[in-house]
Image (cartoon, rainbow, N blue to C red):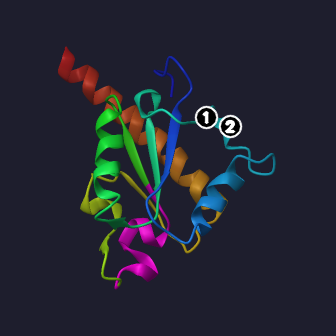
Amino acid sequence: MSYLPKSPWLIHYDASSCNGCDIEVLACLTPLYDVERFGVLNIGNPKHADIFVITGSVNEQNKPVIQNLYNQMAEPKVVVAIGACATSGGIFRECYNVQGGIDKVIPVDVYVPGCAARPESIIDGVVKALGVLEEKHKNMTKVAK
């Protein structure tokens, strides 16, 4: 992560879920897990975010919201799908309004399985996303040259 001029920031969005994964994402911010030790900060503005963390599944109402948040993020950007709902639709995949996982709407770089995903798995996914972010940045600078 030597290229980063600032700490990587992430934005978290709950598409539609039981909120189990959201609670685990919040647990990552507590002193017990302390995701901020990696320099990661949870912010509320997609224009400042490097990593898009999504929990829950896609439906007709949140599809444009997900696309809008993703499109507002500057390049390079990384998407992390957290939990069974975000990766595949989870236990709600047979519901009439659920279209599936996040990859039905935007490209996903890192998948974190689980129902609910454990904080350790979420942190591992975010750390993996940092590696993907660094690789995307290198590729962008190669193309620019």
Q: What secondary structure is the magenta-colored segment mainly?
A: helix
Magenta region includes residue 90: yes
Which numbered circle lies on residue 36? 2
Name the residue tied to disc 1: 41
- Give the residue furthest to the right: 31
- The residue depicted at 34 percent of the width and 65 percent of the height is 58
How far across and down, in percent of the image, does residue 126 sit? 53, 47
Q: Is residue 12 above or below residue 17?
A: above
Contact between labelled residues 2 and 1, with CB atoms less than 8 Å apart: yes
N-terminal label among 1 and 2? 2
Q: Where is residue 2 in the image (x, y as percent from the top left)?
A: 51, 22
Q: Give the range drawn in magenta.
A: 81-94
The picture quadrant where one finds residue 38 is: top right
Q: In which quarter of the image is the C terminus?
A: top left
The image position of residue 21, as x and y in percent, is 58, 64
Q: Nearer the viewer, residue 61 or 107?
A: 61
Task: Name the kind of residue labelled 2 in the image.
Answer: Glu
